[in-house]
Amino acid sequence: MQNPSAYELVPAGDAAPAKAETAVKTVSADAPVHDIVSAANGQVIRVEDVPDDVFASKALGDGVAVILEDGKVYAPADGEISMVAETLHAYGITTPDGLELLVHIGVNTVELNGQGFQPQVKEGDKVKAGDLLCIVDMALMKSKGYPMHTPILLTNGDDCGEIQLLPAKKAQAGKTVVARYRL
């Protein structure tokens, strides 16, 4: 289902069910709008539809997920690599304005202990949206039965005054906008 607010930013409190007593940050209408692009080629879905309770519950943050098709995962925004998981399946990126993103490749892929992942970046590297983060052995993932839903989460999204998520479309890595925000 297409996000009903697909063409305008909405207050962050309206993007997801509000938490009890959570204040929405006030943002100036002049604040710049920042885009987050798809981290992979594939279908973009709501994070609530990822077949994993931790992601679906938004315990790690709100966002979208891309069902990885071709084994290449890219940076969804400009920033600095703040974390590469020891098991090489997850990457943290901090944007210049302080938004913290998590790109998590697949569901339960931590169990592989790094097998099947070829990182192309390391902590401290500067990246641009669309830069290659990791190459994934899709044949291995398929043979082991791992779902390739790849969440792109705004782990500190509560700091945003406005968030717009754009799921339910086929995406091109590094080009298709899957979320917008204002800080």
Image (spheres, rainbow, N blue to C red):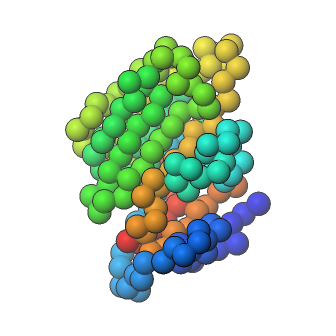
Residue 156 quadrant: bottom left
Quadrant in which the N terminus appears: bottom right
Point 72% across, 63% down: residue: 2
Viewer-nearest residue: 121 or 110 = 110
Q: Is residue 164 left or right of residue 29?
A: right
> What's the residue at 48%, 17% (across, down)?
113
The percent coordinates of residue 55 (x first, y second) are 61, 45
Residue located at (45% from left, 34% from top): 90
Q: Position of residue 21 (x, y in %)?
A: 54, 75
Left or right, residue 166 beside residue 163: right
Q: Quadrant of residue 16?
A: bottom right
Find residue 106 and report its horizontal and vertical position in percent. 59, 32
Q: Position of residue 149 (x, y in %)?
A: 63, 37
User: Taking 165 as reference, is 53 above or below it?
Assistant: above
Query: Residue reaching furthest right?
Result: 1
The number of numbered discs placed on residues in the rendered structure image is: 0
Front residue of 81/169: it is 81
Q: Report if residue 38 is visible in the image.
A: no
Which residue is at the far bottom? 29
Relative to 41, say whether 72 is above or below.
Answer: above
Q: Residue at x 38, y 71 (%)?
A: 183
Specify whether residue 95 is in view: yes
